[in-house]
Amino acid sequence: MPTQTFLNLNEDKQNQVFNALIKEFSDHRLMDAQVARIIKDCSIARGSFYKYFDDINDSYQYVLKRVLRKVHFDVFAQLKSEPTDSLHAFYVATESFINKLKDSDYEQFYRQYVLFNQYELKHVEYDYNNLPDDKLILVVDGQKISDRKTIILTYKWASRAAHQTIRTVLNRGDEKQALSDFANLLKLINRGLVN
C-alpha cells in the first residue's frame, strides 16, 4: 500500500500518479508492467516511485483497492433489500456491476484484473465462514433458510457463478446470454433449496 510520503502528496499529484498507474495496468498485464512507463507518464523520478510504493505489485494493490471501492457492489446490502428472494439479489448485484463497469474509466483495468492479474496475484476466494450470522441471509420463495452450512454453500456457488458471468462479459462474450445463463443457474439452485 502507498507510503505516508505518497499520502502526504496533494490530491492532484496523487491523482496524477494514480492515472498513470491505471493507464499502465489497463494496457499491460501486471507481469508486463514497467515502472519506467509509469514514471514517464506521470513525470516523477524513479526514486520517487519507490518512495511512494514498495514495488510495482504494491502500486497495483493500491490501484485495485481504489478501483474496487468505486465500482464494486455490496452484495450484502442487496441481499437485505430482497426480502423474498436472496438469489435474485445476486443477479441484480451482478447485472448492476456489469452495467456500472461498462464504458467506465476502469473497464479495461478490471478486464486485465479478471482475465490475468488475479491469477498472478494468487487471488484468494472470499471465505463466507467468517461472516457473522446477521450477514448470512438466505430467503427462498419467501422462506428464510436457517442452516448456516446451506447458506454458506449457496453464497459460494452464487458468487462463483456471478464472477464467471462477469469474466465472460469482460472477455467480450455474449452479455445477454451470460446473464440469462446466470439467471437460469440461480433458478436451479433455488429449486434445489425449496425441495
Image: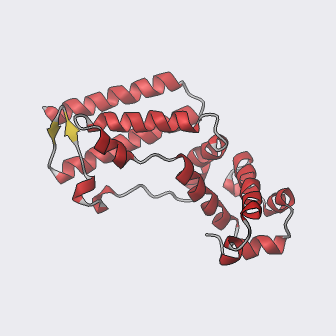
The N terminus, quarter of image:
bottom right
Quadrant of the image occupied by residue 172: top right
The tally of labels here is 0
Please name whichever residue, 98 or 83, is drawn nearer the observer in this view of the structure: 83
In the image, taking residue 63 as reference, residue 15 lies left or right, namely: right
Point 77% across, 70% down: residue: 49
- Residue 54, given in percent of the width and then of the height, sits at 68, 73
Position of 58 relative to 180 (above/below):
below
Q: x and y percent of residue 189 in the render?
A: 26, 34
Classify 81 as above or below 179: below
Asked if residue 51 is positioned above or below residue 71 in the image, the reply reads below
**Residue ID at (35%, 58%):** 127
Q: Residue at x 15, y 50 (%)?
A: 147
- Which residue sits at x=32%, y=33%? 88
Q: How is the image coloured?
A: secondary structure
Q: Quadrant of residue 145?
A: top left
Q: Is residue 27 above or below residue 195?
A: below
- Horizontal and vertical percent position of residue 99: 53, 33
Residue 57 placed where, x, y %? 65, 64
Quarter holding residue 62: bottom right
Comparing 81 with 105, the one in front is: 81
In the rendered image, the quadrant that contains the C terminus is top left
Q: Is residue 89 left or right of residue 58?
A: left
